[in-house]
Amino acid sequence: MSVQSLQRRLIALGFPLPKFGPDGDFGGETQTAVGKALDELEGLRGPKVPEAAKPAPAAPVASGATIPADWMPMAKMERIICHWTAGAHKASEFDRGHYHILIEADGKLIRGIPSIKLNEAPAKNGYAAHTLNCNSGSIGVSLCCMGGSSEIPFNPGKYPMTEKQWTALTSVVAELCRRYGILVTAKTVLSHAEVQNNLGIAQRGKWDFTRLAFEPSIKGAKACGDKLRSEVKAKL
Ligand SMILES: [Zn+2]
């Protein structure tokens, strides 16, 4: 907008301007008028809302599932750890007590019972206990699958991980990264099976994920974790 058109709009709105009308010069009177206009606008809109008090932005529509904004309260979170429940294709009440977000076989999202806020460091009473000695600052997401499975020889059991679950997982993790400002690194976006190696916290042989039932050619915690991170990055 030119200074002249700005001046014309201010005059039209009833603000005092230089006696000789719009002159194209951004002088003291125009500055005063702009200042008054801004004061009035601020008056109409109310005082500035501090950043922390603003409601969570609506979750963006991504391919696959989208997390409702009220599942993601304001909190300082450092990492996202991905699991499977070692149960059936639907979320049980027991599972809901241990994770923040669960993903059923058809890609549907189920909210866990603990709020993400409870796992903000230091973890508060009722936090989601999803990873041994590594729950503070950690968001736990879990795929409902792999009950009755075995690692060696690999047998996914009656409830194999589905590709729909995996696709929803990478969308969910991308949304969480965006919401909580988490960068995608091997220490901040990882599977439970990588915690021991990548963070140095022993996990008693957890193997979620060292195998992906829908893509058996990918083997090992690092290969599965690298696939997770590259697909999450592609969605950011
Ligand atoms: Zn796990």
Image (cartoon, grey):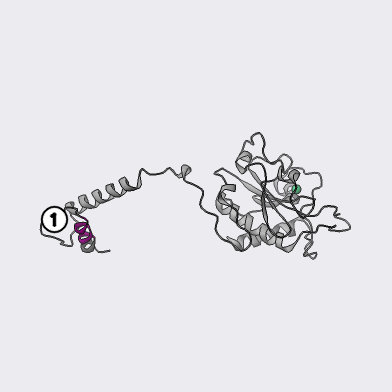
Q: Is residue 117 magenta?
A: no
Q: Residue 184 location, x and y as percent?
A: 62, 55
Which amino acid does the dot numbered 1 rest on?
Pro
Mark 1 falls on what kind of element?
A: loop
In which quadrant of the rendered image does the N terminus lie? bottom left
Tell me the residue that label 1 is attached to. 18
- Which image quadrant is residue 63 in? bottom right
Residue beneath the point at 84% across and 58% down: 158
Q: Residue 89 location, x and y as percent?
A: 77, 55
Q: Residue 181 location, x and y as percent?
A: 55, 50
Q: Is residue 8 magenta?
A: yes
Circle 1 crowding by C-alpha within 10 Å: few under 14, some 14–19, many from 20: some
Q: Residue 152 location, x and y as percent?
A: 88, 56
Along the line of sight, which residue is nearer the eye, 134 or 73?
73
Residue beneath the point at 20% across and 61% down: 8
Residue beneath the point at 77% across and 60% down: 212
- 134 vs 3, left or right, is right
The residue furthest top is 125
- 204 vs 168, left or right, is right
The residue furthest left is 20
In which quadrant of the rendered image does the C terminus lie? bottom right
State whether residue 208 is above or below residue 213. Answer: above
Which residue range is magenta in the image? 6-13
User: Is label 1 within 8 A of ligand 1 (CB to nearest ligand atom)?
Assistant: no
- 227 vs 1, left or right, is right
Along the line of sight, which residue is nearer the eye, 21 or 137?
21
- Give the overall secondary structure of the magenta segment: helix
